[in-house]
Structures are given as structure tokens and as C-alpha cells.
Amino acid sequence: MIKSISLFFAILLSFSFLSAQQTGTVTGKIFDGEFNDVLPFANVVVQNTSTGTTTDFDGEYKLTLDEGTYTLVYSFVGYETKAITDVKIEANKVLELNVTLNPSSSALSEVVITTSARRNTEESVLNLQRNSAVLLDGLSIESIKKAGASDIASAIKSVPGVSVQGGKFVYVRGLGDRYTKSILNGMDIPGLDPDKNTVQMDVFPTNILENIIVIKSGSADLPADFTGGVVDIITKDFPSKKAMSFSLSTSYNPDMSFNSNYVTYKGSNTDFLGFDGGDRDLPISPTTSVPNPASGNNSSLEGITRSFNSTLAAERETSLPNFSFGFNYGNQFDVGENRLGLIASLNYKNETLFYEGFENGVYQKNEDRSINELRFDRRQIGDLGENNVLLSGLVGLSYKTDNSKYNFNVLHIQSGESRAALFTQNTEISNDIDVDKDNLEYTQRSLTNFLIGGQHNDIENDFVTEWKVSPSFSRVYDKDVRLTTFILNNDGSTSISSDAGFPQRLWRDLEEFNATAKVDFTKKYDLFDNQAALKFGALGSYKQRNYDIYKYEVAFRAVTTSDFNGDPNAILDPSNIWTPETNSGSYIRGNFEPANSFEANQNTAAVYVSNEFKILDKLKTIVGLRAEYFTTFFTGQSAGSGESAIVYDNEQTIEELDLFPSANFIYEANEKSNIRLSYFRTVARPSFKESSVVQISDLLTGLIFLGNIDLQPSYINNFDARYEFFGEKAQMFAVSAFYKRFKDPIELVAYSYVAPNQFTPRNSPEAQVLGLEFEGRKNFKFISESLADLSLNVNVSIIKSEIEMAKGEGQEYESRQQFARDGETIDDTRELQGQSPFLVNVGLNYNNSESGFETGLFYNVQGKTLEVVGFGQNPDVYTQSFNSLNFNLSKSFGKDKRSKLSLKIDNILNDDRLSQYESYGDISADFSSRNPGTTFSLGYSMNL
């Protein structure tokens, strides 16, 4: 009897256990197709049952079901009902299913749209774009996964009108960095290079993303300081399920990896973590007075000199391949009746680059107008080695109650760039001399960003309040940059003199604090018997920067520099350092110079109001007005001494109160196509570095950047028109036209023909840009059902720009006429600096989700672009087209296809990155030349 009872309970327990293991979960969000927003309190029901749930204020739902295949019905009053078939629930698994519901016509009692689960997921990729109030292109996490991209920089290249410069920085519509803005979760964030408007995109792994939005038209709730586009990086806040993954990758470049000629130098033990361990710190206080050997109080000079690192020579060793790894975690937890979401990410990348035979040049036109050939002022040829380390970490917490959600994110990015070069420089114009140079550099960058925010909905969910506060700390340290120059004498000996420059040591410290706070209110109401939404809000931003340059050089007393035999390390060898006893040797000289430091701050206060409504059933209108009050204050001193130096003491250099109107009109031609028209006004403001009197030298190239304290903002009127058609399975076609009118555009120009290596930003009078964009996404199912997984993405941008040259004595137009070649006609217009004439992106992709096999061939090219505006004898510099052809191949395998092996080949065409001077008569000369070679990458990732 007891044995029977025991067997009964054992069987019952087993059935209970099995039953508990045979349920799965479907979760996701329901979106409002009318306002491109979430749809709270919508219904989700299993067809022909009473089993179901409703979405919360954030549009999210969660439904636990027994293992099996279901049809789920999504509905909301006044909206179409959508039935999703073939929803497969598997035991102990979470299926994410997002749905968009569109308003139904009042003449119909009920509309039921039926589709499959797989088809619905693919269509959701374009829902955001189709229903947006502004003109945008987006990448959802689904499309990013299909492209096999590991970071944003790799994924975003497929967006129309978008190009990626240097593998990191995103430019929209061919416009340069000045006119493209990056934001993180809707908030300003400085990048690793604070002088750029865009954030370095390769620091964000794709598996922490919700989506990437590229906004191309303005609205009142967006910042006004963009023209090409706004790239909004949106991270996940509430993971739909527990997710944990890691990835590993390595890459090999035949020209760069395992190369015994690689140029480097000994750094610190912590370089592999992206920061210097102290070996490159300035060994003395910046305020230390360095004595002269001839002075009476020179006892400290020997100790000061010996405290400086004695390594001045680059060395050769065998380079290593690139490698990277990443780890990501996400989950949500029940906290009483509320929920807590957690995401965490850690990523590391170590990249080694080697440019053998790189070239830099500074060229000028001949003074004889009958000679078209350019002559070089200086020309460099040599080898350049770089090691770049990138370490990033992200932790995000989200807490959700019945009517509110709170977010807290911390992002830290650490970067270290070590660079060494050995090269020969020939100089002819400014000095007739040939030299050998050793250049050692290290740049340490860090960014720490905090984001605290909240969203609050009233009970009816027709009034929403959102607020965010985001402080950021950015640091850039150029640590012990060293340049040693030996003159190559005719007798074969080497020497050091003031003709070519004494050995230089340089430290640059940049520290920036950025705090932004914003609040947005949305009130939904009825207008003209249609839904409408009133949005209004405010933003405050404060940016403060300190910048210091500390310059020293090695000088000599009673020393024959030819005795060093061209060895830079012999210069500060202990036996060659100056001592009071010998009163001879090498010594450090240099003191703090006020012109090498500045402090500045920028302040922005903004308010806006906008209204989204329908006058007609098919015509959506969004009109708005944004007001921004912007100021810049500068503290510093210009170069020179005594009365020739201009001192600025917290001087206000810019004060502007501007209005930025915007209007967007969307006509729904039918359920699959829209016609869009938009107008908006924007601004491009000078950066801290540009709006200053600082002089920044690049010791490698010999180029000098000169700040321009009189620089003013540029204002742009923008007009856009677009037709877009959305088909099934993420297919679409769109054609866009845009026109931009610039007032006082800011451009980087040659400072004067007397100093051809100096460049400065200047305002030009006016400019205009006219462009066309074409985009198509099509699969090959129309040929054969077996080709349904093969798709072609093509987008082309054709852009014409024109700028009016400044006229008058000493201005650009007159300077070009003065040095025109015989037979050359000088127009008073030219193309806009930084504006590409065309962009082409083509991707042929095969993706079979059932087999886990995916492969693709991707081509990208950007047209020849004006990089530096010429002046007088200095010709224009153009960035030449770089033809990028890349191949991806990946295979998912293992249980639930959790493992993936990927192969990538970058720059299959082995194209060079080239910038050239161009002058009349098809004459060209290299400004900068690098050969990146072809890179082969192998990666492995696993979802745990």
C-alpha cells in the first residue's frame, strides 16, 4: 500500500515537473502606426480562447502559454485588428514579437489583417520609417543581425546617404562631420574626439542596441545643430528575456600583420588597457622654471634633464594581428509588482596598423604663371606604425512601475593610440634641406557618460512626461609626443641645428565637462475628428573645456651633434647630458607659455513647441518652433609677447538667440506609400578649438592648425521631398530630393601662401547644396521561390554643391586670380569643402535563417571631396574616392543555432586612401597617401 502511494506521488510529481517545463513565453511591444509611438492598454488574445493580456503604458506585453503553435489576435478600439498566425511557443523559451496597429476607417466596423509571425517580424523593420513624423532611415536590430555587423560602424553603411570615414565616424548626405550629429538615447554625448560632432561608432556593439535612427529632416524637438542628419543610437532598456553572449575575433592583413619592419617604441606596461601607466607623464610641474646653462642659478637643470624619458628613437619589431572580444548580458527581474531590467556590456579591441611607404606632402604653385607643375615645399616618405586599443563598458538599469519608468545608464570608453614613424623629409621652398625624422606619439582618450531619465504617464495615458539628465566627462591627453630631426649633410654625416629644428617634446591636455538636461511633454487630444499630439519641452546644456600645451625641446651646449651618428637615443644618454662640472652636453629648455592654454565654455538654453495633427484623413502635418539661446566664452591669450599679445578674460565671443521653425507634411497615397515634404532651419556652430586663438602642431605631418576667434555660426535653410513605397518582406523603394542653403558656411582653408603648412577655419559668404537619393531593397523571389532569401540593397546619392568665394583685398577670389595659370579662368564659385558629389552603397545578401547560413558582398564608394580649400599659391586638396568592396560569410550552428562562425574580407580591391593637391592642367601631387591593404577576419560568437 505504502509502495503504491509512493509510486502515485512520484508519477504525479513527474507530471507536474514536465508540465512546468512545457510552457514558453511570447513578449514584445505593440506600436501605434498613427503616431509612431507605443500603444498602451491594447489587447493580446489567443484566437478562439479567453487567454490573453493587455499592454502596459510602455506598449509592452507578456504572455505565458503551453508549448505549441498559436494564432494571436492584437486589437485596440478604433484600430485594425491584426491576427498573427504560426506563433510557435517552445518550452522554456521566450519569443519576441512586435506588432504595429494602424487606425481603421470609421466607416468599417472591424478590419482584420492576417499575417504570419515570420512575415510580421520582417515587416516591422520598416514600420518606424513608414510612420515617422520626420524623414528618416533606420536600422532595427533584425536588419543589423542579417548584415552580420558586430558594431554600428559596420552596420550603418547600408543606410542611404550615409558614409563611414576612417571606419569610425558617420557622415550623412556627404556632408562633413560639422553637419552630422550623434546622440545616445536622444541626448548629446561627446565622443572620444571632442572636436568632432559625431561619436566614434565602432565602440558600440550591436547586441546592446534596440535600433539606430538616421533622421534627415528637422522637427522642433530635435537639436538645431545638424544639417546632414542626426544619428540616434538607441540601446535596449528592458531585455525581453535573459540573454548572455560572448564573441571573439582576430584579423590578418598581409601588409600589416607579422611584418618584421613594423615601427614602434617602448611605452608603458598598461598600454594594452588603453591608458599610459605613468611612463609618459610630464616629469616636472608645468610651472617649473627651467634654468639656462648660462644662468647663475642652474643647479636644477641636470636633474630636470635626467628626469625626461631618454627614448627618442623609433624601433622595428614584428607586428601582431588584430584581436577583439566582447561579453554582453541582459535580463529582467520581478521586484514586487514592478520590474527591473539590466543590461551590461564589455568590449575590447586591439588593432595594429602599419603603413609602409606612407607619403605626406605640402605643395605650391610655381611663381611663374606659365608653369603648371606643382613644386613641393616639403615631402615626407617613410613607415608609420600604429597600435590602437579600445576598451568600453556599459551598464544600464531600468525600473518600471504601473505608470512610470526610470532609467540609469553608465558608459565608459577608454582608448589608447600609440604611433611611431621613421621617415625622410625633403624641403625645397622654405628651406633647402634633407632630414631623417623619428616621431613617437601616444594619445590617451576617455569618455564617461551618465544618463538618468524617467517617463511618467497619467492614468488615461494621454499626457506623457519624459525627462533626462546626462553629465559627461571627456579627457584627451597627448603624452610625451617626441620628434627628433637629423640633417643629412652632403658628406654623409648627420647633425642637428635650428635650420631643421631641435628635438621636441610635447604634452597636450584636454579636459571637458558636458551636462545636458531636457524635459518633454506630450498631450494627445482630438482635432478635426482625428487624433493629434501637442509636444513641448525645454533643454539646457553646459560645456566647459580646459586645454593646455606644454612644449619643451632638447638644446646643446658645447656639443658636436654629428657625434651622435644619427642615433636619437644618444642625445639624452646619461653620458651626454649637461652637468655643471663639464658645462657641456644636452639639456632641456622650455617654460610655460600663456598662448598655449585656454579655457572656454558653451551654453545652450532651448524651448520648443510642436503639434502633430491631420487636417485630412490622409494628410499628416507636423509644425513646430524651437528657440535656442547660445553663448560662448573664451579665456586665453594670442601668440606674441608684451603689447602684441591679445588677452581674453572670459570674453563672450558668440551670443545668439535664434528661432528654428520646422514643418513636415506626410501624404498617405495608399497603405504602402507616402509622399513627404519638409522644411527646417538649422545651425552649424564652431567647435572650441575653432573658436580660439590656439595653434596646434602635428609633429608627424608638420601641419599647423590655427584657431579663429572671430568665427561665427553658419545658418542653413533645408528643404526635403520624398516618395517612399513599402512592400512585403522588408522590400521598399524611395526617391528623395533635398536642397540646402547655407549662410556663412565654415570651411577649413589654407591660412596664406607664405605659410603653406598652416590651416584655419573661416566663414565664406554663401553656399547651396542640391541632392537626389535613390533607395531600393528587393529580394529575388519574383524570379524563383528558391531565391527568396537572396536580396539586393542599392542606394545612391547624387549631390551638387556650390559656394560663393569671399571677395575683396586679401580674400580667396582675389588670391586665386593672383596666382592663376596662363589660360586658366577663375570662377567666383566652387564646391563646398567636405561635401561629397556622390555616394553609392550596394549590398548583395543571402540569408537563410533555417540553415543559419548568411553571406554577402558589399560595395561602398564616396566621390572625390574637397578636403582643404586652397589660397593663393596653395592648391586645393581633394580626398580621392576609396572603393570599398567587402565580403561577409557566417554560419550558425549547434543547439538552437546559438554559435556562429564568421569570415570577413575587407578592402578586396586593395584600394589606397589618398588625398591630393589638384591644380590647373590636370596637375596633382600627394597630400597624404596610405595603403590599408586587404584584411581577413575570423570570428566566433555564442549565445549562452
Image: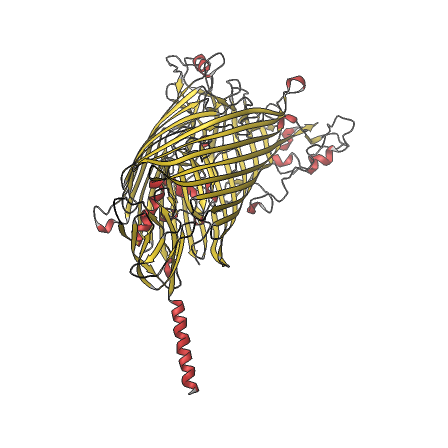
Q: Position of residue 680 (x, y in %)?
A: 40, 29
Q: Position of residue 420 (x, y in %)?
A: 54, 37
Residue at left offset 58%, top offset 31%: 601
What is the quadrant of residue 650 in the picture?
A: top right
In the rendered image, the residue lying farthest to the left is: 783
Q: Please name whichever residue, 617 or 59, is drawn nearer the observer in this view of the structure.
A: 617
Residue at left offset 44%, top offset 53%: 239
What is the quadrant of residue 674 in the picture?
A: top left
Residue at left offset 66%, top offset 17%: 643
Q: How many marks?
A: 0
Q: Position of residue 814 (x, y in %)?
A: 45, 13
Q: Quadrant of the C terminus?
A: bottom left
Q: Is residue 752 above or below residue 604?
A: above
Res. 570 visible in picture: yes
In the rendered image, the residue lying farthest to the right is: 296
Q: Please name whichever residue, 93 or 252, is drawn nearer the observer in this view of the structure.
A: 93
Q: Position of residue 500 (x, y in %)?
A: 59, 25
